[in-house]
Amino acid sequence: MATKPALVPPTDATTDSTISRRGFFMKLGILFNALAATVVAVPMVGFLLSSITRGRANGYLSWVSLGKVSQFPEGETRLATFQNPSVMPTDGKTADTACWVRHVAGEQFQVFAVNCAHLGCPVRWFPQSGLFMCPCHGGVYYQDGSRASGPPERGLFEYPYKIENGLITIHAGELPTPGAPIAELTGERPPCAS
Ligand code: FES
């Protein structure tokens, strides 16, 4: 009959090494959990704070030149393009943004976002009829940007502008939308809402 091996109580050294190994893996687990939580939390916090931080982003809501006033003859409406000031360097040509410039008289202008107020299709100016028309769903606007007919519920979005040193500049950087929460946050006038 085989004899049972006698139980040997663990020595102090064995107990210490078990505890220290267990403690080490515990600390390692906590460290990995903290790292994983940080990786998940950083973009979420960034998203939650974006409504505040983007108001301070470089180029956001800044004045952009459309060119010389003389490029826009009185009584005419012409297409102009500008570089969206709030884009990234990698955006390339997509940073080029179109707008319609109506020179009413003297230093009186209207600068319209090119996007239809319905679903954002680019509207075209027809000087023969004195109307802006949208190719997507038939939205029509008068020469002053007010709604004439079709699905849009409002007139064209308008940029604030100023004339300085013979140049016409607009307040650009925000996409034209009916709401203007960021402009309200920064205490500035909505750039594209009339
Ligand atoms: S997008 Fe212009 S009418 Fe619908």
Image (cartoon, grey):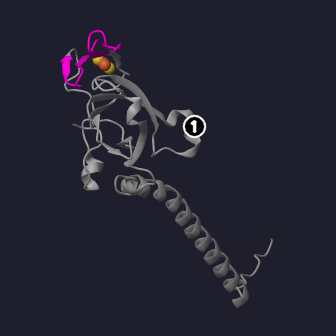
Residue at point 47% right, 54% down? 43
Count every numbered label the image shows and give the total. 1
Which residue is located at x 32 percent, y 22 percent? 76
Q: Residue furthest top?
A: 128
- Ligand 1 quadrant? top left
Image vertical order of residue 130 relative to residue 79, above or below? above
**Whether residue 135 is situated above or below residue 82 in the rendered picture:** above
Mark 1 residue type: Gly
**Ligand 1 within 8 A of label 1's CB?**
no
User: What is the magenta range?
Assistant: 127-148
Residue at image x 22%, y 26%?
A: 155
Say which quarter of the image contains residue 80: top left
Residue indicated by mark 1: 92
The quadrant where residue 167 appears: top left
Q: Position of residue 37 (x, y in %)?
A: 50, 61
Quarter of the N terminus within the rendering = bottom right
